[in-house]
Amino acid sequence: MRKLAILSVSILALSSLGSAAVLVTLNSGQPTGSGPFAWAYDAQLVAGTNGGELDSGDFFTIYDVGGITGASDVSAPANWTITTQLLGIDPPNVAPPDDAGILNVTFTYTGTQILTSGSDVDLATGGTTFFVITSADNFSFTGFQASQSHTQPAHVEDSVSSSITVPGNATPEPTTLLLVGAGLTAFGFIRRRRVV
């Protein structure tokens, strides 16, 4: 069993090295102050074995971003458009966990083709990064990001998904509310039985 686990991890690591991808990372520390809070993200076009390619229409989505109300709470460098939606936008063959009650943010590239030449390319141009301005300062919430880019020289679509730190959900998830409600109901019932 242990050998199978090691083999699986090795295959995943090797496959990610051969793949071109847009990888997104949190570029800021714990938000401080009373808000609103700025969450800065960095995006890199990873070269992979054959080189990476970013075409107009390629994108990345950050899932379940708590504490935002829409695209007006998000900013991006030049040549990127911003949309927010409750579900998706998913790259082909990738389906990260996605809570239908929390907004996702999608950044779509609209500029000229970017090619990697053996090293990664920073997609935050001119010192401008990808920002999410939110009312949430919970630093410990782990969400997901997924992206669509292309590989060279065949221009094949490449989709990846990985975990990323996102602002915590500003409103409790429906399952959490149900569990809390059930617990309070049970507690009230037990307490009532003891009083009677």
Image (cartoon, helix red, strand yellow):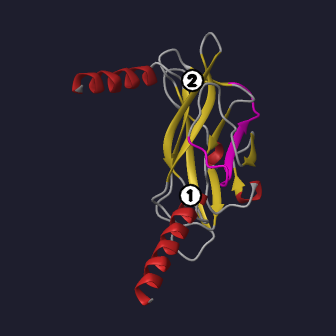
Where residue 36 appears, as percent x and y from the top left, is 63, 70
Per the rendered image, the range of residues in magenta is 97-113
**Res 175 label:** 1
Where residue 10 appears, as percent x and y from the top left, is 33, 23
Per the image, label 2 sits on a secondary structure element best described as loop
Name the chief secondary structure element in magenta: loop
Residue depicted at 48% across the width and 77% down the height: 189
Per the image, label 1 sits on a secondary structure element best described as helix
For marks 1 and 2, the one nearer the N-term is 2
Marks 1 and 2: CB-CB under 8 Å? no
- Tell which tag, 1 or 2, sits nearer the viewer: 1
103 inside magenta stretch: yes
Where residue 64 appears, as percent x and y from the top left, is 61, 51
Q: Is residue 165 left or right of residue 115?
A: left
Is residue 183 positioned above or below 52 on the image?
below
**Res 22 label:** none
Residue most extreme to the left? 2
